[in-house]
Image (cartoon, grey):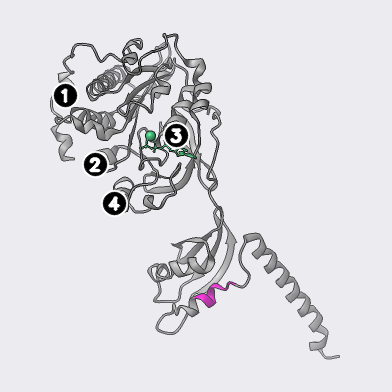
Amino acid sequence: MSSENILEPLVDCIFDVAKVSKKLLYELLDIKEQFNIETFFKTVELKNKKDQYPKQIKIYSSDKGYIYLMSAPIGLGLSNFLKCKESLELQLRHKIDIRERKGYIEIEVITKELNYNIPYKLPIKEKTEGIKFPIGESLNEKVILDLKEDPHTYIVGTTGSGKSVCTKSILTSVSNLYGPGELELYLCDLKRVELNLFSKLKHTKKFVYTVEDTTEVIADLLEETNNRYDLFMKNNVTSIFEYNRLPGVKKLKYQILYVEEIVLLLEDKRKTAMKLLKQLIAISRASGCYVFLTTQRPSNDVIDNVVKANINNRIVFKCEDSKNSIVALDQEGADKLRGKGHGLIKRGSYIVEFQSFFITDQQVKELTRKYISNIKAVKEPYSGYKHLNNKVDSNKKEKPLKTNILEDLSFLDNI
Ligand SMILES: Nc1ncnc2c1ncn2[C@@H]1O[C@H](COP(=O)(O)OP(=O)(O)OP(=O)(O)O)[C@@H](O)[C@H]1O
Ligand SMILES: [Mg+2]
Protein backbone atom coordinates (compact mmCIF):
# COMPACT_ATOMS: atom_id res chain seq x y z
CA MET A 1 0.00 0.00 0.00
CA SER A 2 1.40 3.39 -0.97
CA SER A 3 1.64 6.11 1.66
CA GLU A 4 -0.98 8.05 -0.39
CA ASN A 5 -3.47 5.21 0.11
CA ILE A 6 -2.78 5.00 3.85
CA LEU A 7 -3.40 8.72 4.35
CA GLU A 8 -6.49 8.94 2.14
CA PRO A 9 -9.09 7.93 4.81
CA LEU A 10 -7.46 10.32 7.28
CA VAL A 11 -7.60 13.21 4.80
CA ASP A 12 -11.25 12.38 3.99
CA CYS A 13 -12.04 12.33 7.68
CA ILE A 14 -10.43 15.77 8.23
CA PHE A 15 -12.39 17.15 5.26
CA ASP A 16 -15.62 15.74 6.67
CA VAL A 17 -14.98 17.26 10.09
CA ALA A 18 -14.15 20.59 8.47
CA LYS A 19 -17.34 20.44 6.38
CA VAL A 20 -19.50 19.63 9.38
CA SER A 21 -17.93 22.35 11.55
CA LYS A 22 -18.30 24.89 8.75
CA LYS A 23 -21.94 23.92 8.37
CA LEU A 24 -22.44 24.17 12.12
CA LEU A 25 -20.76 27.56 12.25
CA TYR A 26 -22.88 28.82 9.38
CA GLU A 27 -26.04 27.52 10.99
CA LEU A 28 -25.04 29.10 14.26
CA LEU A 29 -24.45 32.44 12.60
CA ASP A 30 -27.56 32.18 10.43
CA ILE A 31 -25.58 32.53 7.20
CA LYS A 32 -26.73 31.14 3.88
CA GLU A 33 -24.06 28.55 3.08
CA GLN A 34 -24.12 29.24 -0.62
CA PHE A 35 -23.09 32.88 -0.09
CA ASN A 36 -19.42 33.39 -0.72
CA ILE A 37 -18.30 36.93 -0.04
CA GLU A 38 -15.03 36.54 -1.99
CA THR A 39 -17.00 35.46 -5.07
CA PHE A 40 -19.30 38.45 -4.55
CA PHE A 41 -16.35 40.88 -4.68
CA LYS A 42 -14.99 39.10 -7.76
CA THR A 43 -18.38 39.44 -9.47
CA VAL A 44 -18.60 43.16 -8.76
CA GLU A 45 -14.92 43.47 -9.74
CA LEU A 46 -13.70 45.08 -6.56
CA LYS A 47 -10.00 44.76 -7.33
CA ASN A 48 -6.79 46.76 -7.51
CA LYS A 49 -4.63 47.43 -10.55
CA LYS A 50 -2.89 44.10 -10.11
CA ASP A 51 -6.23 42.25 -10.30
CA GLN A 52 -6.10 41.33 -6.61
CA TYR A 53 -9.41 40.94 -4.74
CA PRO A 54 -10.42 41.24 -1.04
CA LYS A 55 -9.90 38.05 0.97
CA GLN A 56 -12.00 36.72 3.81
CA ILE A 57 -9.79 36.31 6.90
CA LYS A 58 -12.46 34.95 9.19
CA ILE A 59 -16.12 35.08 10.09
CA TYR A 60 -17.47 35.37 13.63
CA SER A 61 -20.60 36.21 15.56
CA SER A 62 -21.33 39.69 16.97
CA ASP A 63 -24.03 41.30 19.15
CA LYS A 64 -26.05 42.21 16.09
CA GLY A 65 -25.41 39.17 13.86
CA TYR A 66 -22.06 38.20 12.38
CA ILE A 67 -18.96 39.83 10.95
CA TYR A 68 -16.82 39.09 7.88
CA LEU A 69 -13.27 40.22 8.52
CA MET A 70 -11.72 41.03 5.16
CA SER A 71 -8.24 42.03 4.08
CA ALA A 72 -8.07 44.68 1.39
CA PRO A 73 -5.40 44.43 -1.35
CA ILE A 74 -3.06 47.40 -1.69
CA GLY A 75 -4.85 50.30 -3.36
CA LEU A 76 -8.33 49.55 -2.02
CA GLY A 77 -9.82 51.32 1.01
CA LEU A 78 -13.01 51.66 3.01
CA SER A 79 -14.61 53.92 0.41
CA ASN A 80 -14.28 51.18 -2.26
CA PHE A 81 -16.10 48.71 -0.02
CA LEU A 82 -18.79 51.25 0.84
CA LYS A 83 -19.64 51.55 -2.85
CA CYS A 84 -20.73 47.90 -2.79
CA LYS A 85 -22.85 48.28 0.37
CA GLU A 86 -26.27 48.44 -1.28
CA SER A 87 -25.73 45.48 -3.57
CA LEU A 88 -24.19 43.40 -0.78
CA GLU A 89 -27.24 44.16 1.40
CA LEU A 90 -29.45 43.00 -1.44
CA GLN A 91 -27.57 39.72 -1.73
CA LEU A 92 -27.44 39.07 1.99
CA ARG A 93 -31.02 40.30 2.54
CA HIS A 94 -29.89 42.06 5.72
CA LYS A 95 -28.65 45.54 6.64
CA ILE A 96 -24.88 45.73 6.92
CA ASP A 97 -22.30 48.03 8.51
CA ILE A 98 -18.92 48.39 6.83
CA ARG A 99 -16.02 49.89 8.78
CA GLU A 100 -12.29 49.83 9.03
CA ARG A 101 -10.59 48.21 12.01
CA LYS A 102 -6.87 47.89 12.60
CA GLY A 103 -6.01 47.67 8.92
CA TYR A 104 -8.84 45.26 8.06
CA ILE A 105 -12.36 45.79 6.80
CA GLU A 106 -15.21 44.60 9.00
CA ILE A 107 -18.50 43.83 7.32
CA GLU A 108 -21.14 43.33 9.98
CA VAL A 109 -24.34 41.63 8.84
CA ILE A 110 -27.22 42.64 11.09
CA THR A 111 -29.49 39.64 11.41
CA LYS A 112 -31.01 40.39 14.81
CA GLU A 113 -34.08 42.61 14.96
CA LEU A 114 -35.15 45.19 17.48
CA ASN A 115 -38.07 44.20 19.63
CA TYR A 116 -40.80 46.57 18.43
CA ASN A 117 -43.00 46.42 21.48
CA ILE A 118 -41.45 46.53 24.91
CA PRO A 119 -44.03 46.96 27.64
CA TYR A 120 -42.97 49.37 30.40
CA LYS A 121 -41.93 47.93 33.75
CA LEU A 122 -40.90 49.96 36.77
CA PRO A 123 -37.10 49.99 36.82
CA ILE A 124 -35.04 49.05 39.85
CA LYS A 125 -33.24 51.93 41.53
CA GLU A 126 -29.49 51.86 41.09
CA LYS A 127 -27.34 52.49 44.12
CA THR A 128 -25.45 55.31 42.45
CA GLU A 129 -25.61 59.07 42.99
CA GLY A 130 -27.70 61.16 40.68
CA ILE A 131 -30.62 60.25 38.48
CA LYS A 132 -30.35 57.17 36.32
CA PHE A 133 -33.06 55.12 34.60
CA PRO A 134 -33.70 53.14 31.39
CA ILE A 135 -35.89 54.47 28.56
CA GLY A 136 -35.87 51.50 26.18
CA GLU A 137 -33.76 48.77 24.63
CA SER A 138 -31.25 48.60 21.80
CA LEU A 139 -30.44 45.33 20.02
CA ASN A 140 -28.46 44.01 22.92
CA GLU A 141 -28.91 46.16 26.00
CA LYS A 142 -31.00 48.65 27.94
CA VAL A 143 -30.67 52.29 26.91
CA ILE A 144 -30.01 54.21 30.11
CA LEU A 145 -30.13 57.94 30.77
CA ASP A 146 -27.60 58.92 33.41
CA LEU A 147 -28.24 62.56 34.25
CA LYS A 148 -25.09 62.85 36.36
CA GLU A 149 -23.05 62.14 33.23
CA ASP A 150 -25.30 63.80 30.65
CA PRO A 151 -27.64 66.19 32.45
CA HIS A 152 -29.83 67.56 29.66
CA THR A 153 -31.98 65.87 27.04
CA TYR A 154 -34.01 66.73 23.98
CA ILE A 155 -36.64 64.51 22.43
CA VAL A 156 -37.65 65.23 18.86
CA GLY A 157 -39.81 63.54 16.27
CA THR A 158 -42.74 64.10 14.02
CA THR A 159 -46.33 63.70 15.19
CA GLY A 160 -47.08 60.15 16.35
CA SER A 161 -43.41 59.20 16.56
CA GLY A 162 -43.44 58.39 20.29
CA LYS A 163 -42.32 61.53 22.17
CA SER A 164 -45.22 61.58 24.62
CA VAL A 165 -45.07 57.87 25.37
CA CYS A 166 -41.34 58.25 26.06
CA THR A 167 -42.03 61.33 28.22
CA LYS A 168 -44.61 59.44 30.25
CA SER A 169 -42.20 56.56 30.80
CA ILE A 170 -39.48 59.01 31.91
CA LEU A 171 -41.70 60.88 34.35
CA THR A 172 -43.21 57.66 35.74
CA SER A 173 -39.72 56.22 36.29
CA VAL A 174 -38.19 59.28 37.93
CA SER A 175 -41.16 59.93 40.21
CA ASN A 176 -41.12 56.33 41.41
CA LEU A 177 -37.35 55.98 41.76
CA TYR A 178 -36.89 59.32 43.52
CA GLY A 179 -39.40 60.41 46.14
CA PRO A 180 -40.79 63.95 46.55
CA GLY A 181 -38.11 64.48 49.22
CA GLU A 182 -35.39 63.91 46.63
CA LEU A 183 -36.79 65.27 43.39
CA GLU A 184 -38.87 68.25 42.25
CA LEU A 185 -40.64 68.44 38.89
CA TYR A 186 -41.24 71.66 36.98
CA LEU A 187 -43.61 70.88 34.14
CA CYS A 188 -44.25 73.37 31.35
CA ASP A 189 -46.92 71.87 29.13
CA LEU A 190 -47.27 74.33 26.27
CA LYS A 191 -49.38 71.78 24.35
CA ARG A 192 -51.76 71.56 27.33
CA VAL A 193 -52.43 67.84 27.04
CA GLU A 194 -49.31 65.82 27.42
CA LEU A 195 -48.07 66.34 30.97
CA ASN A 196 -51.25 66.76 32.95
CA LEU A 197 -51.14 63.15 34.16
CA PHE A 198 -48.30 64.38 36.38
CA SER A 199 -49.73 67.76 37.41
CA LYS A 200 -50.89 66.61 40.81
CA LEU A 201 -47.88 64.59 41.87
CA LYS A 202 -46.29 65.57 45.16
CA HIS A 203 -43.05 66.05 43.24
CA THR A 204 -44.62 68.66 40.96
CA LYS A 205 -43.70 72.14 42.17
CA LYS A 206 -44.96 73.98 39.11
CA PHE A 207 -47.31 72.97 36.37
CA VAL A 208 -47.76 75.72 33.79
CA TYR A 209 -48.97 75.97 30.24
CA THR A 210 -48.39 79.52 29.00
CA VAL A 211 -45.22 81.05 27.61
CA GLU A 212 -45.25 83.76 30.33
CA ASP A 213 -45.50 81.24 33.16
CA THR A 214 -42.86 79.04 31.53
CA THR A 215 -40.55 82.05 31.33
CA GLU A 216 -41.02 82.64 35.02
CA VAL A 217 -40.44 79.01 35.94
CA ILE A 218 -37.17 79.03 33.99
CA ALA A 219 -36.12 82.36 35.55
CA ASP A 220 -36.81 80.95 39.04
CA LEU A 221 -34.75 77.84 38.32
CA LEU A 222 -31.94 79.99 36.99
CA GLU A 223 -31.98 82.02 40.20
CA GLU A 224 -32.03 78.82 42.26
CA THR A 225 -29.10 77.47 40.25
CA ASN A 226 -27.11 80.65 40.92
CA ASN A 227 -27.98 80.44 44.65
CA ARG A 228 -26.81 76.84 44.71
CA TYR A 229 -23.48 77.78 43.15
CA ASP A 230 -23.04 80.50 45.84
CA LEU A 231 -23.74 77.84 48.45
CA PHE A 232 -21.26 75.44 46.84
CA MET A 233 -18.61 78.16 46.79
CA LYS A 234 -19.12 78.95 50.49
CA ASN A 235 -18.80 75.26 51.32
CA ASN A 236 -15.85 74.71 49.05
CA VAL A 237 -17.59 72.09 46.90
CA THR A 238 -18.33 72.07 43.20
CA SER A 239 -21.47 69.99 42.74
CA ILE A 240 -24.74 68.88 44.30
CA PHE A 241 -23.20 65.43 44.84
CA GLU A 242 -20.30 66.77 46.90
CA TYR A 243 -22.58 69.16 48.77
CA ASN A 244 -25.08 66.48 49.72
CA ARG A 245 -22.24 64.36 51.09
CA LEU A 246 -21.22 67.10 53.57
CA PRO A 247 -22.13 66.17 57.16
CA GLY A 248 -25.05 68.01 58.74
CA VAL A 249 -26.32 69.84 55.64
CA LYS A 250 -29.94 69.79 54.47
CA LYS A 251 -29.74 67.79 51.26
CA LEU A 252 -30.58 69.66 48.07
CA LYS A 253 -33.22 68.10 45.84
CA TYR A 254 -32.70 67.25 42.20
CA GLN A 255 -34.86 69.34 39.88
CA ILE A 256 -36.25 68.30 36.53
CA LEU A 257 -37.58 70.96 34.18
CA TYR A 258 -39.69 69.49 31.36
CA VAL A 259 -40.74 71.78 28.53
CA GLU A 260 -43.18 70.17 26.12
CA GLU A 261 -42.95 71.72 22.66
CA ILE A 262 -40.25 74.36 22.81
CA VAL A 263 -41.25 75.75 19.42
CA LEU A 264 -44.15 77.46 21.19
CA LEU A 265 -41.65 79.46 23.26
CA LEU A 266 -40.81 81.34 20.08
CA GLU A 267 -44.30 82.91 20.11
CA ASP A 268 -42.79 85.48 22.45
CA LYS A 269 -41.14 87.94 20.09
CA ARG A 270 -38.48 88.83 22.65
CA LYS A 271 -37.64 85.15 23.00
CA THR A 272 -36.94 85.68 26.70
CA ALA A 273 -37.83 82.11 27.70
CA MET A 274 -35.58 80.66 25.02
CA LYS A 275 -32.68 82.87 26.09
CA LEU A 276 -33.14 81.98 29.76
CA LEU A 277 -33.41 78.31 28.86
CA LYS A 278 -30.12 78.46 27.00
CA GLN A 279 -28.49 80.12 29.98
CA LEU A 280 -29.92 77.46 32.30
CA ILE A 281 -28.67 74.52 30.22
CA ALA A 282 -25.29 76.20 29.89
CA ILE A 283 -24.72 76.50 33.64
CA SER A 284 -26.88 73.99 35.51
CA ARG A 285 -24.84 70.85 34.90
CA ALA A 286 -23.51 70.50 38.46
CA SER A 287 -26.37 72.14 40.37
CA GLY A 288 -28.74 69.18 40.04
CA CYS A 289 -31.20 70.90 37.69
CA TYR A 290 -31.86 68.76 34.63
CA VAL A 291 -33.67 69.95 31.54
CA PHE A 292 -35.83 67.94 29.11
CA LEU A 293 -37.11 69.63 25.95
CA THR A 294 -39.40 68.17 23.32
CA THR A 295 -40.30 69.33 19.85
CA GLN A 296 -41.98 68.08 16.70
CA ARG A 297 -40.02 70.51 14.59
CA PRO A 298 -36.26 70.30 14.97
CA SER A 299 -35.37 73.40 12.98
CA ASN A 300 -32.22 75.45 13.37
CA ASP A 301 -34.00 78.28 15.14
CA VAL A 302 -35.10 75.91 17.93
CA ILE A 303 -32.21 73.46 18.11
CA ASP A 304 -29.34 75.81 17.49
CA ASN A 305 -25.66 75.51 18.35
CA VAL A 306 -26.13 76.60 21.96
CA VAL A 307 -28.74 73.93 22.54
CA LYS A 308 -26.60 71.29 20.81
CA ALA A 309 -23.46 72.28 22.69
CA ASN A 310 -25.16 71.82 26.04
CA ILE A 311 -27.53 68.92 25.47
CA ASN A 312 -25.83 65.60 25.30
CA ASN A 313 -28.77 63.18 25.29
CA ARG A 314 -30.42 63.57 21.92
CA ILE A 315 -33.38 61.26 21.56
CA VAL A 316 -34.62 61.33 18.01
CA PHE A 317 -37.73 59.50 16.85
CA LYS A 318 -38.97 59.43 13.26
CA CYS A 319 -38.39 62.81 11.62
CA GLU A 320 -40.40 64.23 8.77
CA ASP A 321 -37.48 64.46 6.35
CA SER A 322 -33.71 64.17 6.15
CA LYS A 323 -33.32 67.93 6.80
CA ASN A 324 -34.93 67.55 10.23
CA SER A 325 -32.82 64.48 10.90
CA ILE A 326 -29.66 66.43 10.12
CA VAL A 327 -30.63 69.24 12.53
CA ALA A 328 -31.49 66.81 15.33
CA LEU A 329 -28.72 64.25 14.86
CA ASP A 330 -26.18 65.90 12.55
CA GLN A 331 -26.87 63.14 10.05
CA GLU A 332 -29.61 61.55 7.98
CA GLY A 333 -31.37 58.42 9.17
CA ALA A 334 -34.10 59.50 11.55
CA ASP A 335 -36.36 60.08 8.52
CA LYS A 336 -36.17 56.33 7.82
CA LEU A 337 -37.27 55.19 11.28
CA ARG A 338 -40.52 53.28 11.68
CA GLY A 339 -42.23 55.67 14.14
CA LYS A 340 -44.09 54.55 17.28
CA GLY A 341 -41.17 54.64 19.68
CA HIS A 342 -38.49 53.46 17.25
CA GLY A 343 -35.64 55.91 17.76
CA LEU A 344 -32.00 56.84 17.68
CA ILE A 345 -30.16 58.18 20.68
CA LYS A 346 -27.01 60.18 20.20
CA ARG A 347 -24.60 60.80 23.05
CA GLY A 348 -21.40 62.55 22.02
CA SER A 349 -20.70 61.07 18.63
CA TYR A 350 -22.10 57.67 19.53
CA ILE A 351 -25.49 56.75 18.01
CA VAL A 352 -27.61 53.76 19.01
CA GLU A 353 -30.87 52.55 17.50
CA PHE A 354 -33.46 51.63 20.12
CA GLN A 355 -37.10 51.02 20.89
CA SER A 356 -38.56 53.03 23.74
CA PHE A 357 -40.71 51.40 26.41
CA PHE A 358 -44.43 51.45 25.78
CA ILE A 359 -46.48 52.78 28.68
CA THR A 360 -50.23 53.44 28.65
CA ASP A 361 -52.02 56.28 30.44
CA GLN A 362 -53.69 53.68 32.65
CA GLN A 363 -50.29 52.35 33.75
CA VAL A 364 -49.08 55.90 34.45
CA LYS A 365 -52.12 56.50 36.65
CA GLU A 366 -51.67 53.24 38.54
CA LEU A 367 -47.96 53.70 39.07
CA THR A 368 -48.20 57.32 40.21
CA ARG A 369 -51.39 57.07 42.28
CA LYS A 370 -49.49 56.86 45.53
CA TYR A 371 -47.81 60.20 44.88
CA ILE A 372 -50.97 62.20 44.11
CA SER A 373 -51.41 65.06 46.58
CA ASN A 374 -54.78 65.64 48.26
CA ILE A 375 -56.06 68.40 46.11
CA LYS A 376 -59.71 68.64 45.18
CA ALA A 377 -60.61 67.26 41.79
CA VAL A 378 -60.77 69.86 39.11
CA LYS A 379 -64.05 70.37 37.30
CA GLU A 380 -63.35 72.61 34.37
CA PRO A 381 -60.50 71.64 32.11
CA TYR A 382 -58.28 74.69 32.29
CA SER A 383 -59.66 76.95 35.02
CA GLY A 384 -58.96 73.93 37.17
CA TYR A 385 -55.23 74.26 36.75
CA LYS A 386 -55.42 77.55 38.62
CA HIS A 387 -56.56 75.87 41.83
CA LEU A 388 -53.67 73.53 41.93
CA ASN A 389 -51.97 74.46 45.14
CA ASN A 390 -49.92 77.25 43.62
CA LYS A 391 -48.81 74.86 40.90
CA VAL A 392 -50.42 77.09 38.29
CA ASP A 393 -51.23 80.65 38.89
CA SER A 394 -52.09 82.31 35.64
CA ASN A 395 -54.23 84.99 37.38
CA LYS A 396 -51.43 86.44 39.39
CA LYS A 397 -50.18 89.92 38.77
CA GLU A 398 -47.20 90.09 36.53
CA LYS A 399 -44.12 89.84 38.65
CA PRO A 400 -41.04 91.59 37.32
CA LEU A 401 -38.56 89.00 36.17
CA LYS A 402 -35.25 88.77 37.92
CA THR A 403 -33.43 91.54 36.14
CA ASN A 404 -30.02 90.56 37.43
CA ILE A 405 -30.38 87.27 35.61
CA LEU A 406 -31.80 88.85 32.48
CA GLU A 407 -29.27 91.67 32.38
CA ASP A 408 -27.34 90.70 29.32
CA LEU A 409 -27.99 87.51 27.47
CA SER A 410 -26.96 88.83 24.10
CA PHE A 411 -23.76 86.77 24.22
CA LEU A 412 -25.91 83.69 23.73
CA ASP A 413 -26.99 84.89 20.29
CA ASN A 414 -23.42 84.76 19.11
CA ILE A 415 -22.41 81.33 20.34
N1 LIG B 1 -42.59 53.01 22.49
C1 LIG B 1 -43.70 52.70 21.81
N2 LIG B 1 -44.00 51.42 21.57
C2 LIG B 1 -45.13 51.09 20.87
N3 LIG B 1 -46.01 52.00 20.37
C3 LIG B 1 -45.74 53.30 20.59
C4 LIG B 1 -44.58 53.71 21.31
N4 LIG B 1 -44.56 55.07 21.36
C5 LIG B 1 -45.67 55.47 20.71
N5 LIG B 1 -46.38 54.44 20.24
C6 LIG B 1 -47.66 54.50 19.50
O1 LIG B 1 -47.68 55.69 18.74
C7 LIG B 1 -48.75 56.55 19.17
C8 LIG B 1 -48.28 58.00 19.15
O2 LIG B 1 -47.26 58.19 20.10
P1 LIG B 1 -47.07 59.56 20.87
O3 LIG B 1 -48.37 60.09 21.37
O4 LIG B 1 -46.01 59.36 21.89
O5 LIG B 1 -46.54 60.49 19.70
P2 LIG B 1 -45.96 61.97 19.78
O6 LIG B 1 -44.59 61.94 19.20
O7 LIG B 1 -46.09 62.50 21.16
O8 LIG B 1 -46.92 62.76 18.79
P3 LIG B 1 -47.39 64.29 18.85
O9 LIG B 1 -46.24 65.10 18.39
O10 LIG B 1 -48.53 64.35 17.89
O11 LIG B 1 -47.80 64.60 20.27
C9 LIG B 1 -49.12 56.03 20.56
O12 LIG B 1 -50.47 56.29 20.85
C10 LIG B 1 -48.84 54.56 20.45
O13 LIG B 1 -49.92 53.89 19.86
MG1 LIG C 1 -47.14 64.08 22.00
Identify whether 237 is placed above or below 104: above
In the rendered structure, the answer to whether residue 315 lies left or right of residue 125 reads left
In the image, 82 versus 266, the foreground residue is 266
What distance separates the C-alpha of mark 2 from that of mark 4? 14 Å
* Magenta: main secondary structure: helix
Q: CA distance from mark 3 to mark 2?
A: 25 Å
Question: Residue sitting at 66 percent across and 63 percent down?
Answer: 27
Disc 3 target residue: 165
Q: Quadrant of residue 28?
A: bottom right
Magenta-span inclusion, residue 21: no
* First to last magenta residue range: 35-40
Q: Is 36 part of what is drawn in magenta?
A: yes
Return the x and y of residue 183 as percentages of the image width and height.
42, 20
Considering depth in this image, is 78 or 373 the residue closer to the camera?
A: 373
Task: Name the residue at 79% across, 83% down.
Answer: 8
Image location (x, y in percent) of residue 286: 34, 28
Q: Do the numbered discs 4 and 3 sit on residues whose CB atoms are within 8 Å?
A: no
